[in-house]
Amino acid sequence: VQLQASGGGLVQAGGSLRLSCAASRSIFRLIPIAWYRQAPGKQRELVAVIDNNGNTNYADSVKSRFNISRDNGKNTVYLQMNTLKPEDTAVYYCNARSAILKIDSWGQGTQVTVSS
């Protein structure tokens, strides 16, 4: 499964962005999809994940501000980011992982920069 992440950019604190992760294959709808981020000098961290049933989980730092959703008809997962903070600045990556299907694919990353 090839993933294409997009939607990053420069935004002021308090603003919003929506990231998209488009998959190349319809099998995508069977796989949990996660968004990770990596800030300069820091380890990559999990931001949000959505399973094939639509169940979601979020990092404590983004709860109530970010929303992950999926449109299986478009083979796309979205990350709606609201009330952005400078500490949200990072490269954001989407990941599709299934041990059963032997899939572990990463998108190319999209830069999100939040100015104060």
Image (cartoon, rainbow, N blue to C red):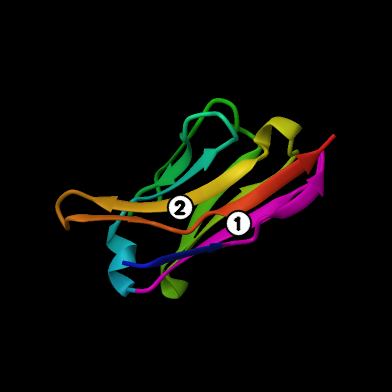
Assign the magenta stretch its main secondary structure. strand
Q: Quadrant of the C terminus?
A: top right
Q: Is residue 21 magenta?
A: yes
Q: Nearer the viewer, residue 68 or 108?
A: 108
On the image, numbered disc 1 is attached to which residue?
19
Tag count in the figure?
A: 2
Q: Residue at x 76, y 41 (%)?
A: 114
The image shows residue 86 at horizontal and vertical percentages of: 75, 33
The three-letter amino acid code for the residue at tag 1 is Leu
Residue kind at label 2, given as amino acid type: Cys
**Where on the picture, by quarter, is residue 115?**
top right
Mark 1, other Cα within 10 Å: few <14 / some 14–19 / many ≥20: many
Q: Which residue is mark 2?
A: 94
Q: Where's the N terminus, which quadrant? A: bottom left
Where's residue 34, x and y in %? 42, 47
Q: Are marks 2 and 1 in contact (CB under 8 Å)?
A: yes
User: Quadrant of the rendered structure where residue 56 is?
Assistant: top left
Residue 23: quadrant of the picture: bottom left
The residue segment tinted magenta is 6-24
Secondary structure of residue under mark 2: strand
